[in-house]
Amino acid sequence: MSLRARISSPEETAGRGEDGHLVASYRAKLLEEIDLAEMSSLAAAERRARLERVLGHIISREGPVLSTVERSQLIRRVVDEALGLGILEPLLEDASITEIMVNGPDAIFVERGGRVEQLPMRFASHDQLMQTIERIVSTVNRRVDESNPMVDARLPSGERVNVIIPPLSLTGATLTIRRFPRSFTLHELIGLGSLDEHMLHLLAGLVQARFNVIVSGATGTGKTTLLNALSGLIPEGERIITIEDSAELQLQQPHVIRLESRPPNVEGKGRVTIRDLVRNSLRMRPDRIVVGEVRGGESLDMLQAMSTGHDGSLATVHANSAEDALMRLQTLASMSDVEIPFVALHDQINSAVDVIVQLTRFADGARRITEIALLESHGGEPYRLATVARFHARPMAADGRIHGAFEYYPLPRRTADRLYMASQPVPQAFGIAQSADQLATREAR
């Protein structure tokens, strides 16, 4: 989109009455006074600063007389409408907001600290909302209209964006912006109460001993955040390939190859799926494969990679429990274009998956690891999970928070032996089971 097009659309602020007309009027005056060619050569921050200075001179010269606060607010609104995303711009700059949800022009919700709240703001009209949406999707060379009413994309700044418009959305154009998650270390997650030191030591040993780890959880439980933190435990000398729908992982190791899937273009061509990338990654001599989320037939390729020499791989799956994660993997693998009996898929999962880390988001917004389970079954046996850590939650307290305690159970001898061979200690809080009776095992069917 050209700079002139971005600044010269005063009609998008119409509908707010006198206030909207004032913003539109000053944006038109701003356009008359700036050199578009010069502005185009500036970086985004310099462009904004230049516009704010020019607009300040215009207001000083022509009025109206405003207080310092009112003047700053007017300048901010005009420049936001000109260069940014209008009323959404301050929300994108608010680090406490993790998700922005626009349900038509009259309803804007945000998520802060795990809780959703409605804000007392609105778009002036449906047209203004659509122009904001078009501005967003145009930055990633996409378009949204009746022939293409759904868009799922990642902005250059990292935010994940989903758009769905009428006639598919009956509540008007709907926009969801998921903020690029900050990279947390496991020690920072301990500070947030997501896990504790004993679990950290165990997870560090499992990752460095090349156990295959599946991070499981429902939407918004922090799967990607935990996956990113766990990947920080991978030794620096290894070649890591990350595969995602929307690139969010921020690995710090020096030898990382980041792959991202691609949707079809407007002609319906050029699509590259997660499965395509997983298959290709196997030809790239990976030491570890990290898949942001398995959600289709690529889970079969991932399971085969895990069980044929690519130990230590990590992936996430959308599931509500450790048992559900195994069933989900089996169902997703069956969606592959390779017809494999469920019995064979069952064997493949028993062979490939070592650890399931289950995440839960509680009513107070806290996200915690609620279970670490080891898959102990072999071959055609029913899935048998051995819980080695669990979070026991108590009812919500008077302060509106949910408290609880982490509990630990002995590790199976086979797991302890693998840790020993990898020179990884067994954390004292867990110990080693001397008999099958000491294991917290259960079957999943």
Image (spheres, rainbow, N blue to C red):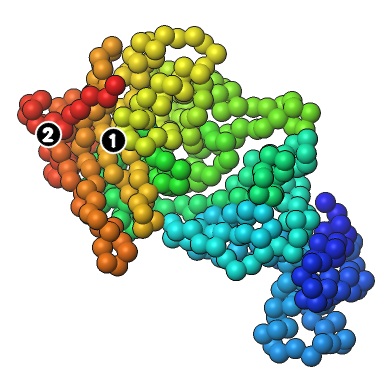
| Figure check: 38 above or below 306 | below
Q: What amino acid does circle 1 point to? A: Leu
x and y percentages locating residue 106 in the rendered image? 66, 60
Instruction: Say if residue 342 shows up in the picture.
Output: yes
284 or 91, nearer to the observer: 91
How many marks on residues?
2
Vertical placement of 348 versus 153: above or below?
A: above
Residue drawn where x is 24% and y is 51% of the image: 393
Residue 206 is tagged as 1
Residue 248: percent from the left, percent from the top? 53, 44
Q: Which residue is mark 2?
A: 432
Q: Quadrant of residue 311?
A: top left
Given residues 205 and 198, the one toward you in this image is 198
Is 73 placed left or right of 195 in the picture?
Answer: right
Does residue 395 appear left or right of residue 366 in this picture? left
Q: Position of residue 84 (x, y in %)?
A: 72, 62
Marking on residue 443 = none
Q: Quadrant of the C terminus?
A: top left
